[in-house]
Amino acid sequence: MNHIVASVQVRMGSSRYPGKAMYEITGKPLLGHLVSRLRLSKLLDDIIVATSINTENDVIASYCKENSIACFRGDENDVLGRTLGALNYMNADIGVEIFGDCPLIDPKIVDFIIDKFLDDDDDPDFVGNDLKTTFPPGMDVEVFKVVALEDSSHRTDDLAIREHGTLYIRQNPLLYKVKNVEAPERWRRPELELEVDTEEDIYVVSKIFDHYDSRNNLNFGLDDIIKFMDSKPNLKKLNSAVPRRWKEARGEENV
C-alpha cells in the first residue's frame, strides 16, 4: 500500500507578514490549527512540517516537538529539496503538499484531491487544484508521486524553480502526467480569499476561527466557511483587493 504523507511548508520569514505561522488565534498558532485540521483527514497516513535550518525557525521546531508533530529542517530557499527530504524522512510514496499559509484547509478537500489522484486510471504523477484557481485560495492541495519529485530534483539546479517545490513538475507536462482538478459548483468560489499573506488576511481568518470557536465547533469545513463569509459581505471585501503573487505565477491577473 502507498504511504501517503502531507508535507507542510512553513517558515517564520515572510516579506509581507513575518512570523505568521506562530500567530495565535483562539489560543493556538496558525500552524497548530493547520495541523489539527489535517489530522481529520481520512486518507493521510502521516503529517510532517518542513521548515528551514535558519535559527529564526527554532520556534517552529520547538512547537512541533512539544506537540508530537514530525519536523524536518532543510535549506531556507530550496523548497524542492526540503520537501523531498521531509517526505523521504517519512518513507512516503505519495506526497501531499499543503502550504503553511492555509490554516483553514478543509480535510475533506485534501481527501477529495487524494481520491482524484488514486482513482485516476491514467496513473498521474501530479494532481492539484491550484494550476487554475477555482477553489478559494487557501484550499490549495497538491498530490504527487515522491519518485516524480525526486526525478525533478535531479533535473534542475535552478534555485528560481527549486524555491517553488513542485514547479518543475508543473512546468513540464511532457515529462510528467500533470492534472488539475476544478472545484465542484458548491466549492467554486475563487474570489473568496482564505489564505494568510497579509494583515488583512489575518483579520479575516481570525474572525472565522473566532466564530466557530465560540460555538465549540473546530471541525468546520469549507461549506461552513462559505456560509459564514456570505453572511458578512464587509468582511469578505476586506482582503479581496490584496495583490497576490501567486496570481502572476498562474497567469491570472490581480484585479
Image: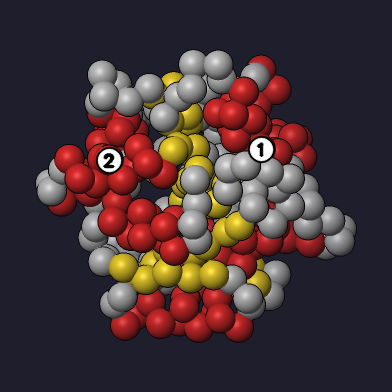
- Residue 227 or 68: which is nearer the viewer? 68
Asked where in the image residue 221 lies, by quadrant, the reply is top right
Residue, disc 2: 151
Q: Secondary structure at mark 1?
A: helix
Q: Horizontally, is 46 left or right of 158 in the view? A: right
x then y, percent, for residue 102: 53, 51
- Coordinates of residue 137 in the picture (x, y in percent): 50, 38
Report the amino acid beneath label 2. Asp
The kind of secondary structure element at disc 2 is helix
- Residue 111 disc label: 1
Residue 193 visible to the viewer:
no
Q: Quadrant of residue 194?
A: top right
**Disc nearer the start of the sequence (2/1):** 1
Label 2 crowd bin: few (<14), some (14–19), many (20+), radius 10 Å? some
Query: Viewer-proximal residue, 116 or 38?
Result: 116
Q: Residue at x 31, y 75 (%)?
A: 53
Please give the name of the residue rendered at 35% of the width and 37% of the height, measured from the top-left corner.
Answer: 148
- Looking at the image, residue 214 lies above or below residue 156: below
Q: CA distance from mark 2 to mark 1?
A: 25 Å
Residue 95, image x and y in percent? 48, 46
Amino acid on which the number 1 mark rests in the picture: Asp
Give me the disc on residue 60.
Answer: none
